[in-house]
Image: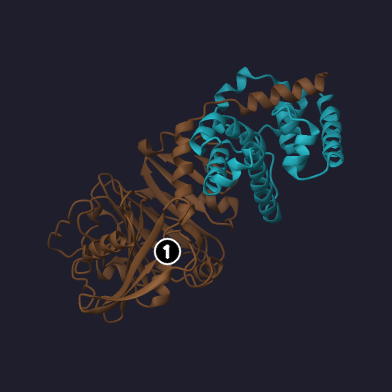
Amino acid sequence: MITFDDYVRLRGARLVQLARLLIRDRHLAEDLVQEVLSKAFVRWKKISAAGDPDMYVRRMLINSNISWWRRRSSSEIVTATIGDRSDDADLGDRTAGQDAAWRLIAELPPRQRATIVLRYFEDLSDERIAEILEISTVTVRSQAMRALEKLRRQLEQSPASIEGGHRR
Amino acid sequence: MNRTDESIMVALQDRADGGVHVEDLLAGALQRGQRRRLVRRTLAGSAAGVLAVAVIGAVAVFPRGGPADVAPAADPPPVSPAGRPPIAVGAPALGEGGTAGQNGLFHLDHEGTTNATWRSGAGWELMQTSGSSVVHTAIGDSTANLDKALAATGMELTPNPTSTPLIVDGKAATLVWSGMNPADGARWGYLRWQPVTGTWALVFTSFAADPGTNAATDRAKLLALTEQARFDQVYRCAVNFRLTWVPAATAITSCEFVGGAQPWARVHLSTGRATYSVNVTAAAATAAKPVNPNTDYSGTPLEYTDAGRVRRVAGAQVVTVDQGDVLLAKNDALHLAAAVQPVTATDPAGWPADPLH
């Protein structure tokens, strides 16, 4: 069984990267991962004994993010202030297409975004995604299909025009 | 793989990239986790109940004219012991007319500590020492307010502790002990008593699962810690900033002074609906997470996160506004952060007791 310390050393960086894609706010992402790991620490014996800590931690991360999003969306509309990454100085190095794609992904509803992130960033199968999200594989496919339809439609527009629409 | 798939993968990889300090992440998770391990259920009454009282019953810690009552006199104020808040000249100690949780005063201290945090709310006070062994000393003007002080530590205690009546210094006391967690040997305990009529106190600590430790050693350690608690000195909260603007209906609910080599303060406030806190720390303390402005208020660059945290750089210091579950309107939060005015004095004796005055 892997120890908690070893697990965090092995997977911590990847979990923070995953959180950056789920939560949109890069600073909050690390806090969220730390919070989720602290919860996992308390139950580590059971989690590691089950033999699949990744699934447990990823599920906690996604559920924490979604419950947070629900609380926020009931009181305030999330604006298009998505480009809050700390290294905005690097903006010039990234292409308009990447910016546009990320903005569109970030605007997806949380479940659809989680599905896309798990499929394209974590390279997981639909069965594995279903397990993490605790939904059926049919639902995973329909979530992914809806998200991809939207992304394809929007990405066919000029990246520059999409980006320009959000520029402040 | 088509072009859309490729665009998505590249965009995600680009967004996710960036350094991660894994050892910091691990240290933070362990610290929170160990605290959480103790945390299962709040003492007497649910956390929700305590929170509701704190929010609905937001009471100004500084009644009108309060801080002025203990403002430094014309004579040079006595110098505080190292790492302590300024001495509240003329303020009576407990048993001499002083009451727990009044006018932003601290009536408690703990011998032998150099790094500690004091916090004072309406009817309660809390002192937390840091170091190898964290000790919480709290007082309240009622048992309910003593529980509020313990709740302010953020700990939820494991249920079903054992209670043992004791006599300490000729006074009736209760020793409350969690029992040893069979999984890892962790446990906590506190001693609760009335040091003077009308004031309830407790000294709380957790115990490491070291070899040779047991209920008897825990009890001895707790009693020794209790002997180090002092209630004969009165300090005042000192805040290293002023609030030149706050949202309507704001009242201070508690004031926190963080002692040590570079002291700073945090003030907890409430509008009756939203709760928030303000603190100013040395920029060096936030080096791991530098401020990255993404908006501004009337030209003042600010960093605003979706959780409602607002930060800004003010010279060599960083202003931070943190919010509770109910957020202020974004414009108010930005206005508030822009209106925080750090004080230039480095000696807490020169800091205001009340940032609103």
Side of B55 where B150 appears, left or right? left
Query: Chain A in the picture: what colour?
Result: cyan
Residue A38 visible? The answer is yes
Side of A110 where A17 appears, left or right? left
Q: Nearer the viewer, residue A14 or A85?
A: A14
Dot 1: few (<14), some (14–19), or many (≥20) neighbours within 10 Å? many
| Percent of width and height locating residue B144 | 43, 76
| Percent of width and height locating residue B223 | 25, 65
Quadrant of the rendered image containing residue B2: top right
Residue A160 visible? The answer is no
Q: Secondary structure at mark 1?
A: loop
Decide: is B63 above or below B189.
below
Decide: is B198 above or below B300.
below
| Percent of width and height locating residue B24 | 45, 35
Specify the amino acid type for callout 1.
Answer: Ser
**Pointer 1 residue:** B178
Quadrant of the rendered image containing residue A155: top right
The residue sitting at the left extreme is B75
Image quadrant holding the C terminus of chain B, namely bottom left
Count of marks placed on residues = 1
Q: Residue at x 34, y 49 (%)?
A: B210
- Which chain identifier belongs to the brown chain? B
Side of B276 where B325 appears, left or right? right
The residue sitting at the front extreme is B212
Image quadrant holding the N terminus of chain B, namely top right
Decide: is B202 above or below B242.
below
